[in-house]
Image (cartoon, rainbow, N blue to C red):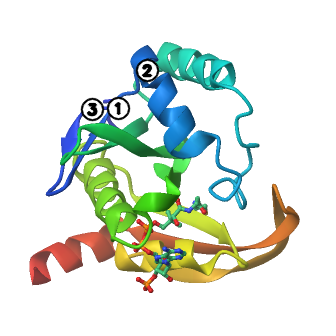
Amino acid sequence: MNRTGTQRIETERLILRRFTAEDAEDMYSNWASDPEVTRFLTWPAHSSVDITRAVLKNWMERYRDGGYFNWAIVWKKTGSIIGSISVVKLLEETEAADIGYCIGRVFWGQGIMPEALRAVIRYLFETVSLNRIAACHDVRNPKSGRVMGKAGMIQEGILRRSGRNNQGICDEAWHAIIREDWEKAQKKG
Ligand SMILES: CC(C)(COP(=O)(O)OP(=O)(O)OC[C@H]1O[C@@H](n2cnc3c(N)ncnc32)[C@H](O)[C@@H]1OP(=O)(O)O)[C@@H](O)C(=O)NCCC(=O)NCCS
C-alpha cells in the first residue's frame, strides 16, 4: 500500500480535494445540517455551523497522515462544495478500504456520487495500490446500493443487525470491488 493520502482528483463534472477551514459555511448549509441527508448516516445533522467548524478542524489535522482519505466534492460548474467521500475504515493488513459518502439533497439523482465513487476507486487501486474496496448501506436506503452498483461494486451479502445509524440498529448490505475485477473491467473498456 502506498500512503499517498488525500490528493486532488478531477472528473468530468467534479473536483475532489481536501477540505479547508473556509468550507464550513457551504458544508453546513449544503448538506451537513440536513436531517434528510443524515437519515441513514452515523452522525447527527449539525445543529450549528460551529459543529461543522470543529469537525473540519479535526479532519484537517488528519491530512498529514498518508493513510487518511477524505475528499470534498466540488461541483465544477459553480465551484461550490456539495458533499464528501471518504475512506471510513482502512484495513492495512488486507490492503482494503471501506468507503462512505453523502451529497446535498438538491444534487441527488444526477449520477454525481457514482462519478465520484468511480474516481475514488480508480485512485485507491492505481495510486494507493489497494486490493479491495467495499461499502455498505442500510437495506432501507437502497439508492446508496445503486451508487455502488454503478461504480462496479457487486453485492456480497447482507449482515443482519450489524450496523447502527440515525435510524437505530440495522441490516447492512455489503458491496465490494476487488482489484482483479477492476483490472478486467478496465481492459474491456
Ligand atoms: C445515496 C446518494 C449518495 C446517491 O447519490 P446520487 O448522486 O444521487 O446518486 P444517483 O444519481 O446515481 O442516484 C442513485 C439512486 O437514488 C435514487 N434517486 C435519484 N434521484 C433521487 C431523488 N431526487 N430523491 C431520492 N432518490 C433519488 C434513484 O433510485 C437512483 O438510482 P437509479 O438512477 O438507478 O434510479 C445520495 O442520495 C445521498 O447523499 N444520500 C444521503 C447520504 C447517504 O445515504 N449516503 C450513503 C450512506 S450508505
Residue at position x 33%, y 71% in the image: 111
State the SS at label 3: loop
Q: Quadrant of residue 54?
A: top right
Residue under pointer 1: 6
State the SS at label 1: loop
Q: Disc 2 marks which amino acid?
A: Tyr
Callout 3 touching callout 1 (CB < 8 Å): yes
Residue under pointer 3: 7
Up the image or down, 175 lies above or below 55; here it is below
- How far across and down, in percent of the image, does residue 164 sit? 83, 57
Q: Disc 1 marks which amino acid?
A: Thr
Residue under pointer 2: 63
- How far across and down, in percent of the image, does residue 110 sit? 34, 70
Label 3 or label 2, whichever comes before in sequence order: 3
Up the image or down, 119 lies above or below 92; here it is below
Q: Residues within 10 Å of mark 1 (few under 14, many from 20)?
A: many
Query: Which residue occupies the foreground of this view, 182 or 50?
Result: 50
Callout 2 touching callout 1 (CB < 8 Å): yes
Q: Residues within 10 Å of mark 3 (few under 14, many from 20)?
A: some
Instruction: Kindly tell me whether residue 27 is visible in this rendering.
Output: yes
Residue at position x 56%, y 15% in the image: 57
On whether ligand 1 comes within 8 Å of the CB at mark 3, the answer is: no
Label 2 or label 1, whichever comes before in sequence order: 1
- How far across and down, in percent of the image, does residue 128 sit? 31, 42
Label 3, label 1: how many angstroms apart (C-alpha)? 4 Å
Give the quarter of the figure containing the N terminus. Answer: top left
Q: Is residue 21 left or right of residue 187?
A: right
Query: Which residue occupies the foreground of this view, 62 or 185?
Result: 62
